[in-house]
Image (cartoon, rainbow, N blue to C red):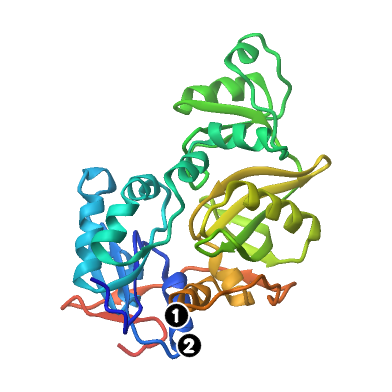
């Protein structure tokens, strides 16, 4: 069971999320909270593991034993908070949320399964948006596609995709047919023209909104933001607030949208920390600090105390493992 004297945090599927590990560590130290950051991953060579206080090996998410392995790790390291980070683990964990929390005494930072299903299946996302009056690009039916009832440009993506994998813009019939062949269970939508934004939202465990931070996507690499700018945009913030009040998720939520000539049009909702979330954390909307404060029993209120007009330029770094497997970091060059 959880040791309530320490707030030990387990970051799942840590992968390359070094920035997120550092954000949790900084918030912990700033608040003078005791506890360790434990990082888990399938690969022993996941870079983020070597920035955590402890590391743990986890099985394949599809193995059928993943929730049990998370429970075992949480019990072994007396975890107070479990933080999933990738799309494929969300639904398996959400379905076992009650058991995980009961068996470990930890909080699993994850919305209810019904909400996860809406976000993970982009057909359900589309339906939810339309039913609640939010703008989304037109989604074409098989009948409309067969009849040629569409106009270019179009956007093709898998209904359960992630990180912009297997997504295509089609400007003509040849490109459309090639994309339809390349994508399993494709969705075909009108292509949205306009600036693209990611919005980091944090909600407490009662789905009360604590912060909303839009950031302009300046450059993207492999589906993840590489350069971005924190902005204040009342139109975006108001519409995202309305979306969160309708959906009622919890924790850190990442919303993708574009501002088009129609207004705020939504791309997807990711009910987890996005890869670029540390940008908003560093700007002052510190989701990691909020989680520690909630653990301490504080009741948080909505705040807009983040700094705007900050530009973030993300880059690669490395950690070296020596002959004994011990890590050495780039900031210590004389190894």
Which corner quadrant of the image does residue 322 belong to? Answer: bottom left
Read off the residue under disc 1: 296
Percent position of residue 319, x then y? 34, 75
Asked whether 160 or 116 is in front, the reply is 116
Percent coordinates x, y for residue 84 in the rendering: 39, 58
69 displayed left or right of 91? left
- In this orientation, does residue 3 appear? yes
Left or right position of 169 against 89: right
| Figure check: 280 above or below 241 | below
Tags 1 and 2 touching, CB below 8 Å: yes
Measured from the top left, where is residue 5 in percent x and y? 31, 84
Q: Is residue 192 above or below residue 293?
A: above
> Which mark identifies residue 153?
none
Q: Residues within 10 Å of mark 2 (few under 14, many from 20)?
A: few
Which residue is denoted by mark 2 in the rendering? 31
Q: Residue at x 65, y 38 (%)?
A: 129
Residue 97 at what x, y percent from top left?
34, 53
x 66%, y 49%: residue: 243
């Amino acid at each position: 069971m959880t040791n309530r004297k320490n707030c030990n945090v387990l970051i799942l599927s840590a992968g390359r999320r070094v920035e997120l590990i550092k954000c949790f560590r900084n918030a912990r130290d700033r608040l003078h909270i005791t506890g360790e950051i434990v990082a888990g991953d399938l690969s022993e060579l996941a870079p983020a593991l070597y920035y955590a206080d402890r590391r743990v090996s986890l099985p394949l998410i599809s193995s059928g034993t993943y929730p049990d392995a998370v429970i075992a790790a949480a019990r072994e390291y007396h975890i107070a908070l479990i933080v999933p980070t990738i799309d494929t683990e969300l639904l398996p964990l959400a379905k076992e949320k009650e058991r995980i929390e009961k068996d470990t005494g930890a909080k699993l930072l994850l919305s209810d399964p019904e909400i996860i299903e809406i976000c993970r299946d982009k057909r359900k996302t589309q339906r939810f948006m339309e039913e609640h009056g939010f703008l989304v690009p037109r989604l074409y039916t098989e009948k409309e596609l067969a009849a040629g009832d569409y106009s270019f440009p179009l956007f093709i993506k898998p209904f359960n995709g992630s990180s912009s994998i297997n997504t295509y813009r089609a400007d003509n019939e040849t490109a459309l047919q090639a994309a339809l062949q390349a994508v399993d269970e494709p969705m075909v939508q009108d292509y949205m023209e306009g600036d693209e934004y990611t919005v980091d939202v944090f909600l407490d465990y009662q789905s009360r909104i604590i912060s909303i931070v839009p950031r302009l996507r300046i450059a993207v690499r492999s589906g993840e933001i590489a350069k971005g700018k924190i902005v204040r945009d009342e139109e975006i913030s108001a519409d995202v607030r309305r979306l969160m009040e309708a959906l009622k998720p919890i924790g850190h939520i990442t919303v993708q949208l574009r501002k088009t000539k129609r207004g705020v049009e939504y791309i997807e909702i990711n009910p987890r920390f996005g890869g670029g979330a540390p940008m908003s954390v560093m700007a002052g909307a510190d989701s990691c600090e909020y989680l520690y404060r909630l653990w301490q029993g504080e009741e948080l209120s909505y705040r807009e105390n983040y700094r705007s007009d900050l530009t973030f330029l993300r880059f690669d770094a490395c950690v070296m493992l020596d002959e004994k497997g011990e890590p050495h970091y780039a900031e210590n060059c004389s190894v």
